[in-house]
Image: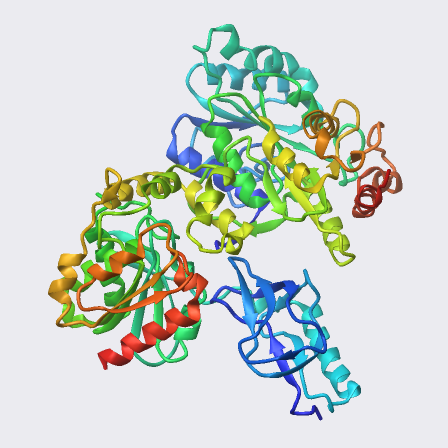
Amino acid sequence: MARTITYREAINEALAQEMERDESVIVMGEDNAGGEGSPGEQDAWGGVLGVTKGLYHKFPGRVLDTPISESAFIGAAIGAATAGMRPVAELMFVDFMGVCFDQIYNQAAKFRYMFGGKAVTPVVIRTMYGAGLRAAAQHSQCLYPLFTHIPGLKVVVPSTPYDAKGLLTQAIRDNDPVMFFEHKALYDMAGPVPEEGYAVPFGEANVVREGGDVTIVTLGRMVHTSLEAAEQLATAGVQCEVVDLRTTSPLDEDTVLESVEGTGRVVVVDEAHPRCSVATDISALVAKKAFGALRAPIEMVTAPHTPVPFSSTLEDLYMPDAQRIVNAIKTVAEWTR
Amino acid sequence: MTDERIVAVTMPKWGLSMQLGKITSWIVAEGDDVSVGDELADIETDKIAGTLEAAEAGTLRRIIARVGEDVPVSGTIALIAPADVSDDDLDAVVQEARAVIDAGVPDEAASGPAVETADIGGRKICYVGAGQDGDVVLLVHGYGGDRNSWLFLQEPLAARHRVYALDLPGHGTSVKDVGDGSVDILADAVLGVLDAIGAERAHLVGHSLGGAVAVAATARDPRRIGSLTLIAPVGFGPAVNSGFLRGFANAQTRRELKPLIGQLFADESLVTRQLIDDLLAYKRLDGVGEALHALLGTLLDGDSQRADSAAAVRVIGGAVPVTVVWGSADRIIPPAQAESVAGAVCYLLDGAGHMPHMERPAEVQAAIEEAIARAG
C-alpha cells in the first residue's frame, strides 16, 4: 500500500494539495505561518503543534497569520467564504470557540437556509480537542457535541492519518461550513496514506473491525482504545465489531443500525462528557430504531460529567481506557434477563 | 534434535504483500487423520479468504495457531506426525512455533518488493517484479483491479519465471489519466513496461479487460509475445453484466460496492472487509471516477460489449499460442464466449466465478505454466 506518514503530515498534505488545486483555498489562524526551515519565520511554527509548517513559503500570500482574536479571524474566514474564497481557519483549541459562537452557529450555519439555498459558506474550521496531554480544564475538552447539535454545520472527527487527509480534502471541497476536530494525541500516529489526492465522503462510517457478538460505536481517538479492548476480548472468544463514525453530522445511521441488528449488543465509547453527547445520541438512535434487535441494555463508556482535572492521576482516571471498555463489553455480552 | 517425522503445517504466502494470515476456523481437529488435499483451515489475509489444504498426509497431532490470531507467513500453525512421536517431542516444536507467532512480523519484512515506475508516453506507470530467472511473464489486471489482483499467482509463478504485474492507466498507483480510455492506450502501457524491463520476449496473461488489452498488445507485435493466456477476457461476445460494470463505476459507499464485488466471485464469502476497503480507497482517488467512466465507454455499447478481440485473435492465432481460462459460474461475462476464442486451448474451471486467478489460483497457474511450456 501507500507510504506511511503521520496524522499531522496527512493534514498538512491535504492543505497543500488543495491549495495547489484550487487558488481560492487559503489558510488563516494564530501562528499558522512559517515553521522550522522556513527562512525568516523562525519565531513561528506552523501552528502551535506544527501542522501548517512549510505552507507559508510554498503559497505566498495565502497563509495568513492573524491577531490573537478568535472572534475576529473566524468572522473574517466566514465572511471570505461567503464572498467566494475557501478559507481553512485554525482555531488552536476548541475550548476557545466560545468567543466566536455567534459567527459559527448563528451566521455560518444559517446562511444557506436564511437565503433560500442561494448562499454557500465553504469554510473549514480546524481545531484541536481531547484530553491526555496534561493541559487541564481549558485546553482538553471534546466539544464536538456542541456543534453536532447545530443544523447547518458538518462535524468531522477523524481517527487515522488516512481519514484525516481524505476528510479534510472533502471538508475543503464541501460548500457548507465544516468543523474539523483533530485530537492532539493522534498527531504523531503514523499510517498508510496515498500520495494522490482523495476525498472521503461525509456520512459514511467505517467498520474498522468486524465481529458478530458486540458492536462498539466510537469516534476519534477512542477508535484506537476500542480496538485495543476488542483485541483483548477476541482471545477470550468475544468478537467485537468496531464502527468509527468519522462524522457526527451527517451521521451514518444505517451502518450503526445494521451492525447492531447483527450483534444485538452495543457499547458506545466517547471521550466527551456523557450528557447530551454523541454517546447519548447513538444510544437513543439504537433504542428507537433497533429496539427489536437488542439483546442487552445499551452501555456507554464516556468521560465523567466533570471538567478535565489538572491532577495527572485524576486525568488518567477521567479518560475512558481499554479496561473500562472491556468491562462494558462483558456486561452486555453476559447480560441475561 | 527434532524428530524429522514431524511435519509442520505453515501459514501460506498468498501474494507478495502478504505478511500475516488469520485462521478463521479449523476444519480439522487434533487427532484427525488427513490426506493430501484435505481442507485443514479457513484463512483470511488482507485481501481475501481462502482454504488451506494439506500438502502431506498423516495425523494432525497439534493445532498451534488459535482462531482469530495473526500468524506471520511461514509460521507453523499445526503439526502432523505419526502416533508414535512422543508428546514431549511435539511440545518442543510447539514451543518454538509459539514464539514465532508471538513475535509477529519483523519490521524489515513489512515493506514487500519495491514498486518500479516507468514513464510511458508521458504517463507514469507502476509495476512490480518477482523472480530471478526464466521467461518474462507480464500479468495484466482487469477493470478496477490493480497489480495486487495477482496476489495468489505472482509469487508461485516467480519460482520459475520473471513475473511482472503492472497497474494499467487509471488504476492502482499509475497515472489516473486514461486519455480516450481506448484499449490501445492501455496496450501502450503493457508494451511500455516490456520496454522498461528490457524484455525482448514475454508471455502475457490478461484478466477480463486486461485480456482485451493483452490481445491488442500482442496484435501490435506478435513476435514479441511467447504465449497469451486470457482469463475470462473481454471482447469475445456481446453479452456482459452491464449492471455490474455501471454499478462499479458509480458506487461511492461500502453499502453500494459490497454486493457488486460479491458478484465477481462464485463464493461471496471470499470477499473480505479489506478488499472492499481497498477498492473504496482506490475509487476515492482524484481522477479515478473519470477514468472508470471513460473505460466504461470502451467496455460497453448500450448493454453489450463494445470491445472486439475475436478478430485480432484469429489473426494472431497462428503465431502465438492462446490459452483461455474461464470459471463456469462467471456472473460478469458468460463462459460460453470461450468458444469464440479461435484456436485456443480452453480450461473451464467448474464452479469458479469471474476471478479464477483468486478463486482457483493453483489451476490457473497450471494453465499458465502449460501455455509457457507449449510456447517453448
Q: Is residue A106 left or right of residue A318?
A: left
Where residue B171 sits: x, y (%)?
Answer: 36, 50
Q: How is the image coloured?
A: rainbow
- Residue B45 or B342: which is nearer the viewer? B342
Residue B213 against residue B9 in the figure, above or below = above
* Count of numbered tags: 0
Specify the quadrant of the image occupied by residue B250.
top left
Q: Is residue A337 left or right of residue B183?
A: right
Specify the quadrant of the image occupied by residue A311.
top right
The reply to whether residue B223 is visible in this rendering is: yes
Q: Quadrant for the C terminus of chain B, please.
A: bottom left
- Residue A270 or B245: which is nearer the viewer? B245
Q: Quadrant for the N terminus of chain B, please.
A: bottom right
Specify the quadrant of the image occupied by residue B191.
bottom left
Residue B176 against residue B133 in the figure, above or below = above
- Residue B72 or A32: which is nearer the viewer? B72
Where residue A19 sits: x, y (%)?
Answer: 43, 33
Q: Residue at x 70, y 29 (%)?
A: A286
Q: Is residue A291 left or right of residue B193?
A: right
The reply to whether residue B198 is visible in this rendering is: no
Where residue B37 sits: x, y (%)?
Answer: 53, 76
Q: Residue at x 57, y 83 (%)?
A: B56
Where residue B69 sits: x, y (%)?
Answer: 68, 63
- Residue A153 or B225: which is nearer the viewer? B225
